[in-house]
Image: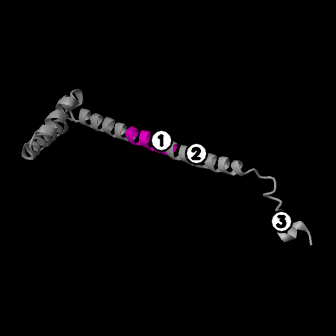
Amino acid sequence: MGLRSAGVLEPHTAHRIPWVDRVDTSWNVLKWVLVVLATGFVGYVGRFGAQWLIERARARRQGKRGDRAAVDSPAVATSTFHSAPKEALKAEKKRAKAEAKAVKKRVKEKG
């Protein structure tokens, strides 16, 4: 009976150095951490890129409707939006909607 069959000498672990296993494990953990960080970065940038595109599309849509004041000065619109009570916001929204509808009706009557 040889040493191999007795379990004394195992071919895959006989030449291994103990600290090499720790370095390999640390490297694998570091690779996964880097992969997760890269994925998070791509997701973060993608999210803000998508929001930017949506805002740009909204601004274009408002510009086509003839609502140039909202496109030219978004800071003023957002500051009044956050400070006004709900009822005032509803009334403003209804007024803007009626105005847009009237503009659309005038354009339709002309053409």
Q: Is residue 42 visible?
A: yes
Local crowd at mark 3 within 10 Å, few (<14), some, or many (≥20)? Answer: few
Q: What residue type is labelled 3?
A: Val
Q: How is the image coloured?
A: one colour
* Residue segment shown in magenta: 38-49
Helix, strand or loop at label 2? It is: helix
User: Was residue 39 drawn as part of the magenta stretch in this picture?
Assistant: yes
Is tag 3's residue or tag 2's residue first in the polypeptide sequence?
Answer: 3
The residue pinned by badge 2 equals: 30
Tag 3 secondary structure: loop
- The first of marks 2 and 1 along the sequence is 2
Kindly identify the amino acid type of the residue bearing the numbered disc 1. Answer: Val
Mark 1 crowdedness (10 Å alpha carbons): few <14, some 14-19, many ≥20: few
The reply, left or right, for residue 98 in relation to residue 16 is left
Q: Quadrant of residue 35?
A: top right
The answer to whether residue 99 is seen in the rendering is: no
Q: Which residue lies under the disc numbered 3?
A: 8
Mark 1 — residue?
42
Eye-nearest disc, 1 or 3? 3
Cα–Cα gap, marks 1 and 3: 51 Å
Residue 13: say if magenta.
no
- Image quadrant occupied by the C terminus: top left
21 on left or right of 68: right
Q: Label 2 is placed on what type of residue?
A: Leu
Point out the frontmost of discs 2 and 1: 2
Percent of width and height locating residue 14: 81, 56
